[in-house]
Image (cartoon, rainbow, N blue to C red):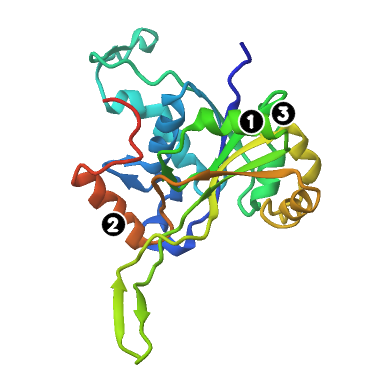
Amino acid sequence: MPEKPKVVILCGGEGTRLREETEYKPKPMVTVGGLPILWHIMKSYSHYGYNEFVLCLGYKGEMIKEFFLTHELMHNDFTIRLADRAHDHIHRGSDAAEDWTITFADTGLKSMTGSRIKRIEKYVGGGEFLMTYGDGLSNINMPATVDFHRKMGTIATVTAVHPRSKYGLMGIGDRDLVEAFVEKPVLYDYTNGGFFVFKNEIFDYLTHDESCMLEGEPFARLVEEKKMAAFKHDGFWHCMDTYKDFLDLNHMWDEGKRPWKVWAD
């Protein structure tokens, strides 16, 4: 049985459109239901058995390191002996800690997405890997994307999702009378949902230069060469791009409407 591919998560951007939350923390550390959105993303992958992660750090990356280094201590009782810290004991509850292996990679403060990925090439191993941004939640079936990617045989597979309009749409009749008004509908067109599967050949399209943007020239080349496939996902998808998105996702969590939560408690 082939080894599970690793998951690369881009965690280095400043999140300028979410400045209310990101002025003092990196965007992946903005919380939903009291835990960072990054944790929710990793739980989604882990549900399907993808437990090895490479986090591409940049802006305030030390806060992401600190969260995972102290996460287990902060969520359990523990006993320490100050004179002998070698025998610290964590009183774990019935739920074991997440069985995750995490590589924390400093990929630069100002690096664009392509250069961040290029700089972690040595950590992903051979064959293929998964990649996503640190700000999107979905109930995408991750193994299905991998199966589709292998079937298509392309270098890259992007998950295509239906975005939700930020504005209400109107239907106007022949006499300029409004016949319908739909508040922020899901649009018919597809957009980049931010969940990818890559063959390692993707690194040949990237450079270490911090100006290398994955979504620019590398994607244009892949499209021109017909080496990028689209996995269509018609289910839930929501990106935390603005402060309103932050409020919406937390409201959903508080109301118990959590379609991205594919894992069991």
Chain-order first, disc 1 or disc 2: 1
Q: Nearer the viewer, residue 30 or 262?
A: 262
Badge 1 vs badge 2, beta-carbon distance below 8 Å: no
Badge 1 vs badge 3, beta-carbon distance below 8 Å: no
Q: Left of 148 or right of it: where is 219? A: right
CA distance separating discs 1 and 3: 12 Å
Residue with the mark numbered 3: 122
Q: Nearer the viewer, residue 210 or 147?
A: 147
Please tell me whether mark 1 or mark 3 is closer to you in this view. Answer: 1
- The secondary structure type at the circle numbered 2 is helix
Chain-order first, disc 1 or disc 3: 3
Q: Nearer the viewer, residue 143 or 177?
A: 177
Please tell me whether mark 3 or mark 2 is closer to you in this view. Answer: 2
Q: How many numbered marks are there?
A: 3
Point 70% across, 45% down: residue:
228
**Residue 106 figure quarter:** top right
CA distance separating discs 3 and 2: 38 Å
- The secondary structure type at the circle numbered 3 is helix
Q: Left of 219 or right of it: where is 99? A: left
Q: Is residue 10 visible?
A: no
Point 34% across, 23% down: residue:
72
Chain-order first, disc 3 or disc 2: 3
Query: Can you say which quadrant of the picture contains the C terminus?
Result: top left
Residue with the mark numbered 2: 247
User: Taking 238 as reference, is 169 above or below it?
Assistant: below
Residue with the mark numbered 1: 129
